[in-house]
Image (spheres, rainbow, N blue to C red):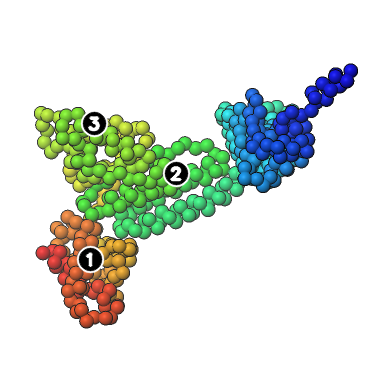
Amino acid sequence: MQRVKDQRSRSTKPDTIHVSAQSGDLPAVQKFLRENPSILNDRNPVMANTPLHVSAGHNSVEVLKYLLNLDWAERVELEAKNMYGETPLHMAAKNGCNEAAGLLLSHGAFVEAKANNGMTPLHLSVWHSLRAEDCSTVKTLLEHNADCSAKDKEGKTPLDHLSQGLGHEKLRGLLTLYLEEQRKRRAIEACSETKEKMDELENELSNLVGLHDLKLQLRKWAKGMLLDERRRALGLRVGTRRPPHMAFLGNPGTGKTMVARILGKLLYMVGILPTDKVKEVQRTDLVGEFVGHTGPKTRRVIKEAEGGILFVDEAYRLIPMQKSDDKDYGLEALEEIMSVMDSGKVVVIFAGYSEPMKRVITSNEGFCRRVTKFFTFDDFITEDLAKILHMKMNNQTEGSLLYGFKLHPSCTVKTIANLIETEITEKQRKEMNGGLVDPLLVNARENLDMRLSFDCIDTDELLTITLEDLRSGIRLFSR
């Protein structure tokens, strides 16, 4: 009889920390950890639950408090996952252990953690509420900003798990209320972010002189993309915009490369492209010297540009001016690029002189189907060139040749425009456009250096480029 009693006593005695945590036996849990602190985050057989999982899933509040507040070198694992990928918060949620859920959340448990089936604690708490008709844990999670629109691996939100028939009105009303509040909050946040992004775009566009039609198009794209962001924030389902492939037509120095870089920033900024990189290439970067070299070389360049923009400068060089019996390797490179343009992995911009670019446009019957936006970059007028010069001087970075220098007050946009008009021929202006500004300023600085004496100690005079310096710089440049 005594032996039976002893056996019963041994059988009811908790033999693991997990059993003690489940039953809420705090002294036993403390004893286990005093004897062996390393079992704090031990996993039990089969389910791989930690003591924190077990205490949370059985609402053993005192054990839970003790484990969460332990100030040891080894801390309790708040986001530990069991065999189902569930965290302790999942365990509390699916068993309706509201007090345990609140404790875990107050200690920083991740309310959007996902189990192997993609369910969040809110999904599981809704399941429990359907069975127990108790919404308290659902409410606790919602008060800690649990996302009502989160989807599991079946694409269902917590609200989708409610049947469409009658019943569960209280639970449905609670979820619907918070869903609308979250949508409104996201819309307000998106509105603020949209304004910031549009301001950033306008700042980028302010660095471009002229190009009014192109700027208008960029603003249209940006606004449409950003409004789509707001639509999605409100829970509306809209199609994903795909940025078009483009052709930039114009003379050198008209801003084609700069616009491509700004476009890269824009498309990344509004989430259309995953990166803001712009891979700038010419024929020599794409075309090999021997049979079989061009394909791999071009594919390697395309791979490097994925997620961003591939900017093919002087694209007309890919197409021979006269037909030849032998296949030109440039045509092979163009065909490789055309083959990936429908994939959505890269945005391609072909750039070059307007007239020679007609060879590219007519070389492949699928070109105009894939390249849907054509932009002409007009030559800069003298006033635009003067504005570019002013902007260059005002935006010198440390380490650049003209950093620290400034223009004399007499060097207004109007006086510089007149200087360019009279001293630089129209032919030169069309050939170089904005490309003439940098060498002109370098020459002007050299003229400043030549006319100053070593005795000069006037700090203002040492750093000021005058109208005469610019005039001398232009004449030297023209010559």
Q: Residue at x 17, y 43 (%)?
A: 356
Q: Which mark is residue 478?
A: none
Q: Which of the image's four quarters has the N terminus?
A: top right
Judge by depth and name the residue closer to the eye, 337 or 125.
125
| Residue type, mark 3 in image | Gly
Residue that mark 1 sits on: 441
Looking at the image, residue 447 sits to the left or right of residue 85; the answer is left
Q: Which mark is residue 295?
A: 3
Q: Residue at x 30, y 44 (%)?
A: 279
| Residue type, mark 1 in image | Leu
Q: Residue at x 68, y 27 (%)?
A: 163
Instruction: For residue 268, say whether it is visible.
Output: yes
Residue 259: horizontal and vertical position, in percent?
Answer: 32, 51
Q: Residue at x 76, y 29 (%)?
A: 14
Residue 31: horizontal and vertical position, in percent?
Answer: 74, 37
Looking at the image, residue 435 sits to the left or right of residue 132; the answer is left
Judge by depth and name the residue closer to the eye, 379 or 260.
260
Disc 3 residue crowd, few under 14, some 14–19, many 20+, Cα 10 Å = some
Q: Quadrant of residue 57?
A: top right
